[in-house]
Image (tube, rainbow, N blue to C red):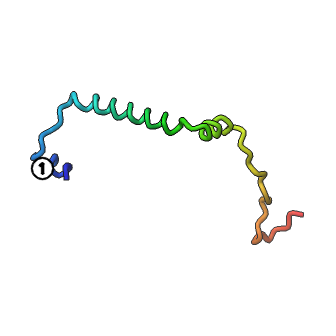
Amino acid sequence: MSFLKRLLGSDPKPEPDAAPHDEAAYERDLLLDESRRLNDDFIQRQMRFADRSWTPPVQGGTRRADDTADDA
């Protein structure tokens, strides 16, 4: 609804100085929420050992069931 009001000109435009302050506060809130979310022992342990995760070996080969060529 606010989009239509701005488009039609019936809504006053926000002050240009207010936007950077609001954006900085928003970024600060995001960083605080992220730090609270990551302040868990289990999550910190997962992130610490993430580079040592095990991946299973690749199974099968390049040949498929519908291949008619004999590569033997």
The quadrant of the rendering that contains the C terminus is bottom right
Q: Residue at coordinates 73% horizontally, 48% vertically from top-left?
A: 55
Q: Residue at coordinates 19% horizontally, 53% vertically from top-left?
A: 1
In the image: residue 33, left or right of residue 71: left
Q: Residue at coordinates 77% horizontally, 59% vertically from top-left?
A: 62
Q: Amino acid at mark 1?
A: Leu
Circle 1 SS class: helix
Q: Position of residue 10 (x, y in %)?
A: 9, 47
Q: Position of residue 16 (x, y in %)?
A: 20, 30
Q: Position of residue 22 (x, y in %)?
A: 28, 32
For the residue pair 30 and 59, the one nearer the viewer reads as: 30
Residue that sits furthest to the front in the current view:
41
Residue that sits furthest to the right in the current view:
72
Q: Position of residue 35 (x, y in %)?
A: 49, 34
Residue 3 higher or lower than 45, as above or below: below
Identify the residue position indicated by label 1 in the image.
8
In the image: residue 28, left or right of residue 22: right
For the residue pair 30 and 63, the one nearer the viewer reads as: 30
In the image: residue 26, left or right of residue 54: left
For the residue pair 6 and 36, the one nearer the viewer reads as: 36
Q: Residue at coordinates 25% horizontally, 32% vertically from top-left?
A: 19
Mark 1 residue crowding within 10 angstroms, few (<14) / some (14–19) / many (20+):
few
Tally of numbered discs? 1
